[in-house]
Image (spheres, coloured by chain):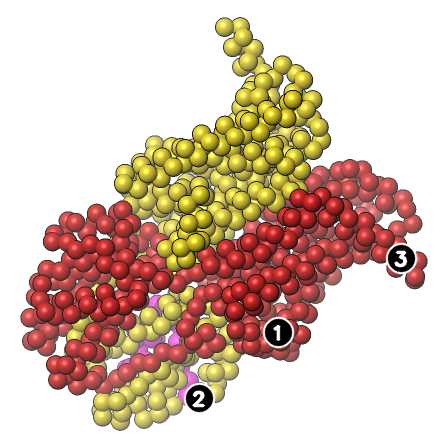
Amino acid sequence: MSALIAKLRRILALMRKEGYQILRDPSSIALGIVMPVMLILLFGYGLSLDVKNVPIAVVAEEPSPLVTQAISGFRLSPYFDAHVMTSMAEAQQLMLARKVDGIVVLQSDFARHLSMGDAEVEVLVHGADANRARIIEAYAQGALAQWAVIRDDEGQDVANGPVGIEARLWFNSADDSHYFLVPGLIVLVMTLIGAFLTTMVVAREWERGTLEALFVTPVRTDEFLLGKTLPYFLMGMIGLMLCFLASRFLFHVPFRGSMLLFVGISTLYLLIALGIGLSISSAVKSQFVASQLTMVVTFLPAMMLSGFIFDLRSMPVVVRAITYILPARYFVAMLQTVFLAGDIWSIILPDAAVLTVMMIALLLLSRRATRKKLA
Amino acid sequence: MWESLARIMALIRKELLAMLKDPRARWSVFVPPVLQCLIFGYAASYDLNNVPYAVLDQDHSIASHDLLAHFDGSRIFTRVANFQREADISRVIDDERAILVIQIPQDFERNLLLGKPADVQLIADGRNSNTAGVAQGYAGQIVDNFNADWRSTHGMSDPPMQMTMRAWFNPNLETRWNMIPSLIGTITLIQTMMLSAMSVAREREQGTFDQLLVTPFRPMEIMAGKAVPSMIIGTLQATTILMVAQLWFRIPFQGSFFVLYPGLILFLIAAIGIGILVSSIAETMQQAMLYGFLLIMPFSLLSGLTTPVTNMPESLQIVTLANPLRYAITIAQRVYLEGVGLDVLWPNLWPMAIIATVTLGAATWMFRHRVG
């Protein structure tokens, strides 16, 4: 009993020391609190893949009522900010200067060709942002189709028909890219606090030799690990709550799963991140190398290879195979599901199982990596 | 003059030694950029090569089979399931086994033959709304093809209006063509900013910076001694990534290296200036690294790398004016895809020169005025 109390006291003492260190060094507060808030605001307000109000040039060399009607779809569409002009050269100048992202060209005798049945509308897009360009093409088609509907009502045939498409977007009927970007940022915050910050803190103790000094005290390895990681675990949880509140109340991302599950999977991922951080710092013992390694092993993959911005399904097989060994991939899949689709166990259970195995392996590894150096 | 140069050279040598003497540090400076360029070059793509889809065909007619044959015949769509009941749709979508479900209503063929509009439903998994949009776009093209075939085989005239699409500079709209040039700047930014952020802070933490200050070195010389080694490493890194882009990904290069390199070097000076300024403010290596990182995040997010700058609100677009990476990405993309010259790129060059001057000046001042 007294042994247990002594153990607890040692852990608490370590935690207190770590807590002071966090509170007294503005840089770790910056990473733990300022960074999540900054990320939330950047992601929420700064990042968007949605295409709205795209400046385009509509070139109609001979304005006529028919032409006005034909381009009405572009002028009324919320996706476009159409500038009508008569000169193609002017439109090209604007496109080269990136003042417009696309040009819609109606040939000079559009009305006559239309009555003859061989009218042509050309849509030019700037390919420097391929994704945006593709979306613009699709919207342009939609805008022209709108006119086709009007003509249809008037009994005139313009449509591409006969088969039309009625598109529905499940889980995100608003077609808002924040719905997947904002939950995804939880992965970044957890990775930063869990892996990056812990790596730096522990590597510094190795570099300065204070860790070896600690080993001659009665503190045991697992006590050290607990005392060291708990404060950062708490910091990660605060970051998690900040992200959650922001996504719900600032950006109105729907949350269709259960809170318990959400906290559960996040805890799992945070422990993994801590495990990676501890293992790396104990293995390399240099702040610079450890931070570079953590960046390459955890942060960049969490950003690029997790399915958070870039869909895993668009990657070639080899790269997709790599993503399977990265914990971030499983966490993102579960987050997107819990937020937008609900508790779908056929996704949650296998992914959570993989993460649990990873967590146990990493925590054992970090324990070993730290203890080995005692000898 | 010569003495000053000799002192700077000595400092550069010492600095390069400090950066590269640890074999692990050497490793961490050169291997990750190449690996990152390779992996992210493949990963950072919004194109879909494979769209798993499922079918709920309530019509079971020749026309509906014909439409589905158009889907199956495309290289992109792979059918993963056929349903009988509407309730089944949620099964494949929930499990992410299919991105799209095509629902063909009962009177599909009848309407078609009567010449009435016949609609099909496309249900997409919106958990990643961008992917869903891309997949729906592909499906739209296939339906267009079906329509054209149907019109010609059923004696209907061609629609009186045709729409043609053309993309400038990137005819097949491959994301990789704009992503990989952007990675040159992004990857070098991360590395060089971190290296330069460490430079002064390491010496501060070890106490050797105070010693440096009492030597005959002038602050300007210390600055040069700190900045040049990072420059050398950064230029080598950028060149390595450029080689991966050229030799491995074979991204078409329309411009000239004599335009790209001045842009990249100016960018590196600006990035290193920011790094050294951070380093001169920080008390410890940990602070330097964390602050450096705290800057790299918004730099890379607000650069146009992942989402376009024009999609950001006005206020953030103004913030991006202080972001060297934004200019580097514009320069790399325009040189690569459009082949423009320095005269066109001028608006992207002078802001970086200002960033470099301000940060390097401030850091030099900090050397003398922050003795901890």
Q: Residues within 10 Å of mark 3 (few under 14, many from 20)?
A: few
Depth check, front residue: B93 or A30: B93
The residue positioned 50% from the left and 56% from the top of the image is B40
Q: Earlier in the sequence, mark 3 or mark 1?
A: 3
**What colour denotes chain B?**
red
Identify the amino acid type marked 1.
Answer: Leu
Is there a contact, CB below 8 Å, between mark 3 and mark 1? no
Identify the amino acid type marked 2.
Answer: Ser
Check residue B23 in the rendering and tell me which mark sits there, or answer none. Answer: none
The residue positioned 59% from the left and 61% from the top of the image is B241
Q: Chain of mark 3?
A: B
Q: In the image, residue B321 lies at what x, y percent? A: 60, 62
* Residue highlighted by disc 2: A87
Q: Nearer the viewer, mark 2 or mark 1?
A: 1
Q: In the image, residue B370 lies at what x, y percent? A: 79, 43
Judging by colour alone, the chain drawn in yellow in this rendered image is: A
Q: In the image, residue B181 lies at what x, y percent? A: 55, 65
* Residue highlighted by disc 1: B345
Q: Nearer the viewer, mark 3 or mark 1?
A: 3
* Residue highlighted by disc 3: B6
* Residue A255 visible in rendering: no
The answer to which image quadrant residue B162 occupies is bottom left
Please report the bounds of the magenta region as a residue range.
Answer: A69-88
CA distance for labels 3 and 1: 36 Å
Q: Is residue A87 magenta?
A: yes
The residue positioned 45% from the left and 29% from the top of the image is A360
Depth check, front residue: B23 or A271: B23
